[in-house]
Amino acid sequence: MATESSEMVFVQDPANPQCPNLPKRAGPDQIPDHVPPELILDAGLITGAEYLQEPHDYMAAMHEKFPPVFYNVSPFGNSWILTKHEDCLHVLRNAETFRNLEAAPFPRDPNDYFFFIPQEIDPPHHRKYRNIVDPLFCPAGVAKLEGKIRQRAGDLIDQFAAKGECEFTTAFGRPLPVSVFLDIMGLPQDMLPTFVEWADIMIHSQDPAEVGMAFGKAIAYLKGAIAEKKANPDEGVISLIANASIDGRPLSDKEVFGFVCFLWIGGLDTVYATLNNIWLWLARNPDRVQEIIDRPGDMHKIVEELLRRYSVTFSSRYVTHDIELRGVRMKAGDRVMTCLPAANFDPDVFPDPLKVDFDRPRKTILAFTVGVHSCMGGHLARLELRVALEEWLKRIPRFSVKPGTEIAYKPGGVVGPAAVPLVW
Ligand code: HEM
């Protein structure tokens, strides 16, 4: 249980999940005494007007505007914010001191609690869950999906290539990861329009009731699919999880659901937001598109640099015992948010950070975090991105943003333009 004292003890029993009731500090009335007043600042992230003008430019500029460690006060939750690459690496690589409990920002019924697995499970249990699905998500596992992803990407583009225009998000950015997800999970492709609709509402709707309804429908569907895969196992991920055992016992219903549900959350909006950001950049930079076309042998490093330049999300942790970071005292129960896009713009590590430079010296990028919780779908996401680029540029090598379009960013924990209308 968390206190303001020197240590927090986490008891985590994933098979019998209890709501951890960690301290939730929000707003100016809930700033702990140990936070120095000069470090209390408004980060302006997620909802700030300046941030929403151009979120990535804003996060690059954080290195000049803010100290490297500061305390952000927000109605959505108070937290230390870290922007330096080195500090983020330190936090993300120290799972003992910085824990992942309640890392997923989705409310659950405290009386019927479940963990989002594996994201909210800390060592030593965490690895056992990842071992179940690692054969499918490791580089060799996802390499087997390349042909299918290529086919899905090509089929989608063929539907609109001759029209000379499309709204990228609805035509390609969202359906591609959803169709790949359906394949991996072992779900039928005719669910694509429904999954796209749910994902769209969950990502874009400003109406909590509507979001709740879409999430509820997805939950009901996933629970039905889990029951079906228990009865009739197949090769897909749902079946693998539903029929898995750890420590010599089958996974409980809550473990299976928490795992399948987190894959659904983790694998959809992150990929689509990344695609949206990158296609907007391509549409605005035809000379760079030509450079990509001219360097087919460099696709891996091209994808890596685009992931650095357009990383889309953040990682938060709880501090378990009193520490000092860059001379700043943090106490057990404090929340720390590593601003991954800002870390990817740290000028000490990536000089001229906003420049897309495919020939940068190789450095650890933080789009997928690092450490025990590094993204399980990272290899899949890289593959989807590479194949999407290759298949698109083969068919539509020159395109631009539709004249008169205003690009808008909506508040949310995943950063990307809401729509990208294109013409060619
Ligand atoms: C460009 C696309 C993606 C980005 C930027 C991304 C980003 C991330 C980040 C930053 C984390 C760490 C969260 C934390 O530290 O608390 C994470 C974890 C995770 N991601 Fe992704 N992700 C992407 C795609 C995917 C896909 C396609 C899947 C699966 C189909 C996936 C599944 C997961 C899972 C299961 C975790 C939890 C890993 C763990 O805690 O051990 N992600 N992702």
Image: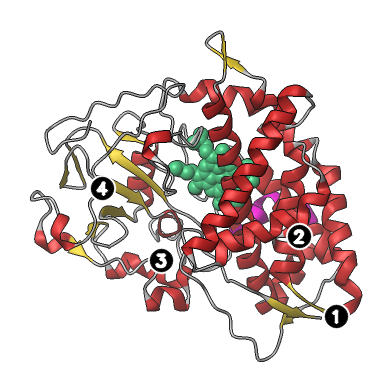
Return the disc, 2 or 4, that comes first in the chain's sequence. 4
| Quadrant where the N terminus is found in the figure | top left
Outermost residue, left side: 33
Q: Residue 88 carries which label?
A: none
How many angstroms separate mark 3 from mark 1 (CA)?
A: 34 Å
Question: How many marks on residues?
Answer: 4
Q: Are marks 4 and 3 in contact (CB under 8 Å)?
A: no
User: Could you say whether the residue bearing mark 3 is in a helix, strand or loop?
Assistant: loop
Q: Which amino acid does label 1 sit on?
A: Gly
2 vs 3, front mark: 3
Residue matched to label 1 = 164
Q: Quadrant of residue 279?
A: bottom right
Q: Which mark is residue 389?
A: 2
Q: Which amino acid does label 2 sit on?
A: Leu
How many angstroms separate mark 2 from mark 4 (CA)?
A: 42 Å
Residue matched to label 4 = 24
Residue 72's place in the image compared with 131, above or below, is below
Q: Give the range drawn in magenta.
A: 296-306
Residue matched to label 3 = 46
Lateral position of residue 151 relative to residue 66, left or right: right
Badge 3: residue crowd in 10 Å (few <14, some 14–19, many ≥20): some
Q: In which quarter of the image is residue 57?
A: bottom left
Q: Residue at (59%, 85%) from the top-left corner?
A: 406
Residue 106's place in the image compared with 359, above or below, is above
